[in-house]
């Protein structure tokens, strides 16, 4: 899977051929918002990613909007769980402010994940429009 890093935005392609997504959502990438260490604040770039996801959600009013929060492995388990939840809640709140019905938003804090290519990648929230239930 290829990744494209632009400022603080990375698009991770979904598996379009799985047949689980309705119509025009099959080719839509997961929207990813990145955070600085120990923060759940949305910067201007992050708000742009969320607004883009909100636009897609409003164009597909029956699709669920799954918001998955992550943290890096530094810190304790409880702290990272709370931080991943705070990040996911911040994104969900911005989605609501951008006009997405709260009933459609599923928030799932995932806690800490190992560092990937760089620490920033672990400090993220993934937004999946039409992505169904969050993975276990």
Image: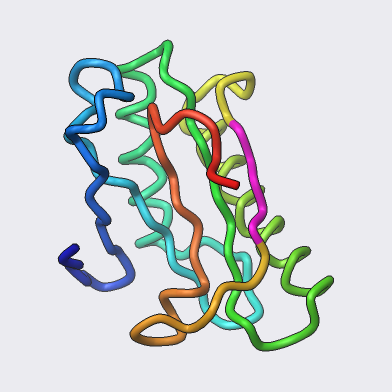
Q: Is residue 52 left or right of residue 54?
A: left
Q: Main secondary structure of the magenta part?
A: strand
Task: Please tell me which residue is depicted at 28% across the width and 17% down the height of the picture.
Answer: 22
Assign the N terminus to one quadrant of the image.
bottom left
Q: Is residue 90 left or right of residue 23?
A: right
* Residue ranking furthest to the top: 62
Q: Is residue 112 magenta?
A: no
Task: Please tell me which residue is depicted at 41% across the width and 33% down the height of the picture.
Answer: 131
Horizontal and vertical percent position of residue 2: 15, 66
* Looking at the image, residue 66 lies above or below residue 38: above
* Looking at the image, residue 125 lies above or below residue 117: above
Task: Please tell me which residue is depicted at 39% across the width and 32% down the height of the picture.
Answer: 129
Identify the image quadrant of residue 62.
Answer: top left
* Looking at the image, residue 104 lies above or below residue 14: above
| 68, 114: nearer the viewer | 114
Horizontal and vertical percent position of residue 90: 62, 51
Please report the bounds of the magenta region as a residue range. Answer: 106-110
* Residue ranking furthest to the right: 78
Identify the image quadrant of residue 58.
Answer: top left
Horizontal and vertical percent position of residue 38: 66, 80
Q: Is residue 96 left or right of residue 118?
A: right
| 6, 68: nearer the viewer | 68
Q: How is the image coloured?
A: rainbow
Q: Is residue 108 magenta?
A: yes
């Amino acid at each position: 899977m290829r990744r494209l890093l632009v400022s603080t935005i990375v698009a991770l392609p979904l598996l379009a051929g799985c047949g689980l997504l309705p119509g025009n959502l099959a080719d839509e990438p997961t929207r990813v918002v990145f955070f600085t260490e120990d923060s759940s604040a949305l910067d201007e770039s992050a708000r742009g990613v969320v607004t883009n996801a909100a636009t897609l959600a409003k164009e597909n009013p029956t699709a669920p909007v799954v918001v998955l929060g992550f943290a890096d492995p530094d810190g304790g388990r409880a702290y990272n769980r709370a931080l991943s939840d705070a990040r996911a809640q911040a994104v969900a709140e911005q989605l609501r402010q951008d006009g997405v019905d709260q009933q459609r938003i599923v928030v799932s804090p995932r806690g800490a994940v190992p560092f990937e290519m760089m620490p920033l990648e672990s400090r993220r929230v993934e937004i999946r429009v039409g992505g169904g239930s969050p993975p276990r």
